[in-house]
Image: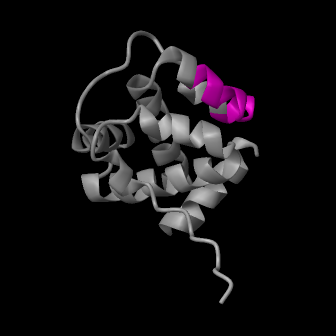
Amino acid sequence: MRFPLFVDAVARRAELPTDDAATISRAVLQTLAERITADESADLAAQLPDDVGGYLATAGPPATGAAVDFLYRVADRAAVDPALAEVGTRAVLATLRETVTVGEFQDLVAQLPRGFDAMVDPLPRPPYDV
């Protein structure tokens, strides 16, 4: 999936114009890179096209902070309000979940701040045979 397709998926999920979805997608990916280890960032980027994974470049140890700090950082980077940053973050995470392996997505979420799992929509349950 190239960055324009990634952005289109985010735009549909978040019901945003494409330009806004692109800005928020970049901000979320860059902020994710600050919150996870360099190894995890490299593992995640390896499963994404270069033009998407390139936003996951890291420059130091993972930053700390709660999920709300993450959202404020995304909002600041994208120049949007925190509520829109949350909608965009949810859409980016859902798109990432569809793009990378289940194990890689679980590794990513395991490294995110406490409370962050509330922004990760649960996987749908398989239907039960009755």
The image quarter in which residue 75 lies: top left
Q: Who's the residue at 28% across and 59% down the image?
A: 83
Q: Position of residue 127 (x, y in %)?
A: 64, 79
Q: Is residue 87 magenta?
A: no
Q: Position of residue 117 (x, y in %)?
A: 37, 50
Most extreme residue toward the top is 60
User: Residue 110 versus residue 100: which sits nearer the camera?
Assistant: 110
Q: Who's the residue at 23% across and 44% down the image?
A: 68
Q: Position of residue 31 (x, y in %)?
A: 41, 32
User: Residue 129 versus residue 52: which sits nearer the camera?
Assistant: 129
The image quarter in which residue 71 lies: top left
Q: Which residues are magenta?
A: 41-52
Looking at the magenta stretch, what is its main secondary structure? Answer: helix
Relative placement, left or right, of 8 versus 74 is right
Relative placement, left or right, of 56 versus 37 is right
Q: Who's the residue at 38% across and 12% down the image?
A: 61
Relative placement, left or right, of 70 versus 128 is left
Q: Position of residue 29 (x, y in %)?
A: 50, 36
Whether 55 is drawn above or below 70: the answer is above
Most extreme residue toward the front is 130
Quarter of the C terminus within the rendering = bottom right
The total number of labels drawn is 0
Is residue 97 visible in this depiction of the protein? yes
Q: Who's the residue at 58% across and 67% down the image?
A: 12
Is residue 26 visible in this depiction of the protein? no
